């Protein structure tokens, strides 16, 4: 059996060389063609109309939407994808990087017709020190003038409060000598030292000198001092915590939480007082508390001149005490009795004034409207029609003396003074109001000629209930009470 003929080992036929040359040529041509096609698709290489070829450095062109893109064949997809990725990365690096901008501000125009206002930053800075008009530091700021117009309040008072307010006595207007003489002050000093065992001096009464002619218009004043019950009702009307800053932005009164000797309690919701103390005169009230109470019920504080007129009685030269010119310790509650504290507002009826007003001597001293000045009685403005005291001041006048003073201080002419935010356990108040004559008068058969307005008015002692019912409330006070602008105290 013959052996297969495989040819010579390592030998090559002459036709094989030509085949390898053809295969190499095809491969050499196809690779550049594929790369060129890729670059042409990416736009890296472009063919100009002139037939020349150029390499593009621009961003790849966007294919128009009306031209259909021809996808590469399946066998070259991987090569095309790799080329596209490489070309995109090279293009991104070649492009300049743009700084990001606020898209909203570049699209939406912000209106500029109204300038933006700066926002105020609130900080816990201390209040500025009060100064006078000349710029110097003072312990008390300068107060507004007494002729500052006051908007008369016309509140709608709830029944529980209006049913408690005091009746008022009608005080006949007229001219009288307000103040006293230096001789009377020296006599009062002697009586205080020798009779009452006090330590009075004539200097304590010098601010009541000299006597000067004053004319007051007819007005009304409450027959009794304001009681604890009335003031508690007022505080409950204002609401919880009103005693702290509820009276013209100032403290009204101290409760047992601030002063254990107070007669008013506060349980965080309601104010109250002991049943046995309800009818006692309220004390420890500030001037602001007194004024706010009076305004709430449509009244006001009396002026110093009005108070003295109501205490001294009718006539040019009134009494030294509400009942006369002779001291009688049974008619007033003073320190001579050795008893502590203000008592019922209807007490000591024997000490009623000729106008029918109770306890204008002793029991509780009383705030009045006026600022205090030691030499005010020496000034021309202290005389004349309806004086209202100095234009400015730091203290308010207190009248009538109290259970804690000697008879020297309860004389109808004597003056005391305290800062309006002070609280004293013997200082209270009563309210006043303008008198508005009735428009019509009911017919009467009364033959008494000693009526108001008659020239025959004499020292007839009226009863405390001479005026019954609620008084006519004025719509505009002839002599408005000022509203002081005082920075809050740190209580």
Image: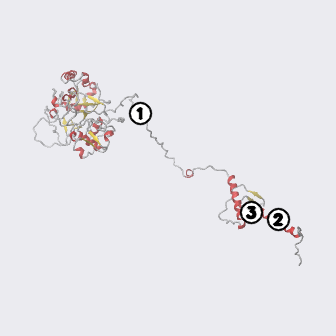
Label 3, residues with CA under 10 Å away: few <14, some 14-19, many ≥20 = some
Quarter of the image where one finds residue 123: top left
Q: Nearer the viewer, residue 400 or 354?
A: 400
Find disc 1 in the rendering and name its residue: 128
Specify which label sits upstream in the sequence, 3 or 2.
2
Depicted 438 relative to depicted 140: above or below? below
3 vs 2, front mark: 2
Specify which label sits upstream in the sequence, 1 or 3.
3
Could you tell me if residue 480 is visible in this image? Answer: no
Mark 1–mark 3 Cα distance, whole angstroms, equals 86 Å
Dividing the image into 4 quarters, which one contains the C terminus?
top left
Residue 150, image x, y percentages: 31, 38
Mark 3–mark 2 Cα distance, whole angstroms, equals 20 Å
The circle on residue 24 is 2
Q: For the residue labelled by badge 2, is the local secondary structure a helix, a strand or a loop?
A: helix
Q: Residue at the front extreme?
A: 1
Rendered residue at 16%/42% (across/down): 441
Image check: 116 left or right of 441? right
The circle on residue 37 is 3
Depicted 180 relative to depicted 228: above or below? above
Image check: 164 left or right of 128? left
Residue 397, image x, y percentages: 27, 30
Q: For the residue labelled by badge 3, is the local secondary structure a helix, a strand or a loop?
A: helix
Q: Nearer the viewer, residue 285 or 109?
A: 285
Could you tell me if residue 185 is visible in this image? Answer: yes
Dividing the image into 4 quarters, which one contains the N terminus?
bottom right
Depicted 192 relative to depicted 43: above or below? above
Contact, CB < 8 Å: mark 1 with mark 3? no
Label 1, residues with CA under 10 Å away: few <14, some 14-19, many ≥20 = few
């Amino acid at each position: 059996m013959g052996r297969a003929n495989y040819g010579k080992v390592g030998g090559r036929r002459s036709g094989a060389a030509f085949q390898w040359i053809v295969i190499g040529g095809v491969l050499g041509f196809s690779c550049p063609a594929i790369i060129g096609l890729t670059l042409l698709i990416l736009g890296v290489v472009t063919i100009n109309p002139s037939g020349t070829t150029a390499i593009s450095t621009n961003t790849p062109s966007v294919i128009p939407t009306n031209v259909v893109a021809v996808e590469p064949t399946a066998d070259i997809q991987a090569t095309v994808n790799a080329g596209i990725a490489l070309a995109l990365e090279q293009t991104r690096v070649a492009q300049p990087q743009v700084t990001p901008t606020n898209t909203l501000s570049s699209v939406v125009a912000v209106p500029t017709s109204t300038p933006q206002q700066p926002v105020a930053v609130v900080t816990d800075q201390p209040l500025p020190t009060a100064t006078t008009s000349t710029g110097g530091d003072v312990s008390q700021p300068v107060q507004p003038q007494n002729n500052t117009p006051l908007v008369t309040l016309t509140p709608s008072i709830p029944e529980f409060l209006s049913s408690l307010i005091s009746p008022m006595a009608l005080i006949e207007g007229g001219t009288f000598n307000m103040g006293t003489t230096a001789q009377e002050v020296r006599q009062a000093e002697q009586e205080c030292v020798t009779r009452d065992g006090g330590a009075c001096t004539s200097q304590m009464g010098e601010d009541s000198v000299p006597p000067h002619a004053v004319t007051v218009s007819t007005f009304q004043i409450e027959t009794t001092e304001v009681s604890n019950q009335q003031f508690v009702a007022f505080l409950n009307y204002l609401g919880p915590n009103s005693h702290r800053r509820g009276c013209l932005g100032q403290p009204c009164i101290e409760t047992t939480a601030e002063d254990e000797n107070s007669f008013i309690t506060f349980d965080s919701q309601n104010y109250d007082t002991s049943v046995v103390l309800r009818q006692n005169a309220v004390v420890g009230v500030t001037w602001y508390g007194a004024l706010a109470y009076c305004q709430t019920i449509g009244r006001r504080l009396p002026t110093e001149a009005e108070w003295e007129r109501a205490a001294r009685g009718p006539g040019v030269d009134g009494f030294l005490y509400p009942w006369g010119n002779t001291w009688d310790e049974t008619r007033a509650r003073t320190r001579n009795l050795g008893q502590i504290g203000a008592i019922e507002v209807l007490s000591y009826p024997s000490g009623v004034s000729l106008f029918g007003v109770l306890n204008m001597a002793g029991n509780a001293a009383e705030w009045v409207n006026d600022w205090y000045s030691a030499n005010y009685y020496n000034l021309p403005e202290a005389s004349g029609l309806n004086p209202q005291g100095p234009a400015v001041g730091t203290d308010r006048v207190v009248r009538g003396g109290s259970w804690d003073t000697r008879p020297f201080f309860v004389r109808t002419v004597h003056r005391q003074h305290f800062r309006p935010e002070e609280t004293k356990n013997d200082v209270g108040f009563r309210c006043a109001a303008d008198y508005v004559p009735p428009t019509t008068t009911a017919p009467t058969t009364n033959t008494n000629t000693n009526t108001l307005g008659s020239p025959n008015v004499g020292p007839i002692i009226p009863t405390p209930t001479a005026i019954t019912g609620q008084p006519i409330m004025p719509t505009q006070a002839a002599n408005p009470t000022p509203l002081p602008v005082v920075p809050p105290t740190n209580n």
